[in-house]
Amino acid sequence: MAELVGAIGVVATLGYLAVQIRQNTRVIHTSNFQELQRDYSTLANTIAGSPDAAEIFDRGLASFDALSQAEKARFHWMISEPLKGAQTCFQLHRRGLIDQELYTDYMNSFFRLLHAPGVREYWKHGRRWWHEAFQEFIDRELREPPSR
């Protein structure tokens, strides 16, 4: 009888641990997504807070190559925020640490930005700053016509 009670206790403990792990995984996925959203918020605040930054960003989206050297440097730092977020999202997805739906929504939003003519031009110059697997992922995306 003691063995049966012990076995029931072990099964109950394992069930409890499974529920806790599942809840913890959801919390981690949500936390990861919230961190990604902060990257876009940083960019939005930069652009919204400065007419000069907004103009450079807008012109950079149209043509990175048409910017002055100083403007290219500023655009690089502005566009680095969403690129950093996309690279993080890409890596989290590869490790199974972000929900598929959140990943898809985030990346579709990023891809709209990526397909801007100036961002495509920027990528030719700035791709070397990013992780190799992410470079390949972005290169594949840029070969596709924008559909999002």
Image (cartoon, rainbow, N blue to C red):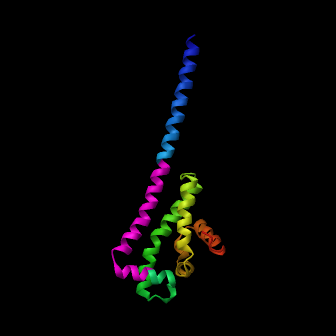
Residue nearer the viewer, 107 or 147:
147
Q: Residue furthest left?
A: 49
Closer to us: 45 or 69? 45
State yes or no: residue 36 in magenta. Answer: yes
Q: Residue at x 54, y 78 (%)?
A: 116
Q: In percent of the image, x 54 and y 81: which residue is there?
A: 125
Residue 68 as seen in the image, left or right of residue 139:
left
Image coordinates for residue 143, horizontal then vertical, percent? 66, 75
Q: Main secondary structure of the magenta part?
A: helix
Quadrant where the N terminus is found in the figure: top right
Residue 114 is one of the magenta-drawn residues = no
Q: Position of residue 24 (x, y in %)?
A: 48, 42
Residue 141 higher or lower than 34, as above or below: below
Q: Which residues are magenta?
A: 28-57
Left or right relative to 141: residue 130? left
122 and 144: which one is in front?
A: 144
- The image quadrant of residue 5 is top right
